[in-house]
């Protein structure tokens, strides 16, 4: 085996390894993107539920506050 043939074989082996590395990396990025998409979807749903609960509590507090004001007004009118 002469020098040129050794260099050609080395380049060919490196090229094959590079192609394999590229394919593995592409697969890993694809899997990572799928995992990230799933996490974003799941967290989005959880956040939506949390904000819905927050909104319900805020609405309930608004109703309670309105009722307390109504009672305060009634009590103040009775005192006068």
Image (cartoon, rainbow, N blue to C red):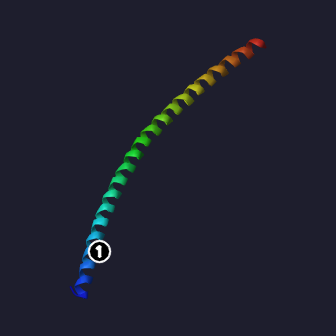
Q: Count of labels shown?
A: 1
Q: Quadrant of the C terminus?
A: top right
Of residue 46 and residue 56, the one placed in the foreground of this image is: 46
As drawn, 52 above or below 68 = below
As drawn, 6 above or below 80 = below
Describe the element under mark 1 as helix, strand or loop: helix
- Left or right: 75 as drawn, with respect to 45: right
| Residue 77 in which image quadrant | top right
Of residue 53 and residue 62, the one placed in the foreground of this image is: 53
Residue located at (30% from left, 61% from top): 24
Q: Which residue is situated farthest in the left direction here?
A: 1
Q: Which residue is situated farthest in the top direction here?
A: 78
Identify residue for label 1: 14
Question: Measured from the top left, where is residue 66 in percent x and y?
Answer: 62, 23
As drawn, 8 above or below 47 = below
Of residue 78 and residue 28, the one placed in the foreground of this image is: 28
């Amino acid at each position: 085996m002469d020098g040129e043939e050794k260099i050609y074989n080395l380049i060919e082996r490196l090229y094959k390894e590079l192609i394999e590395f590229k394919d593995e990396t592409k697969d890993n990025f694809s899997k990572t993107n799928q995992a990230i998409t799933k996490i974003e979807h799941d967290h989005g749903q959880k956040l939506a539920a949390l904000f819905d609960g927050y909104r319900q509590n805020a609405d309930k507090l608004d109703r309670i506050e309105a009722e307390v004001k109504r009672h305060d007004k009634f009590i103040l009118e009775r005192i006068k």
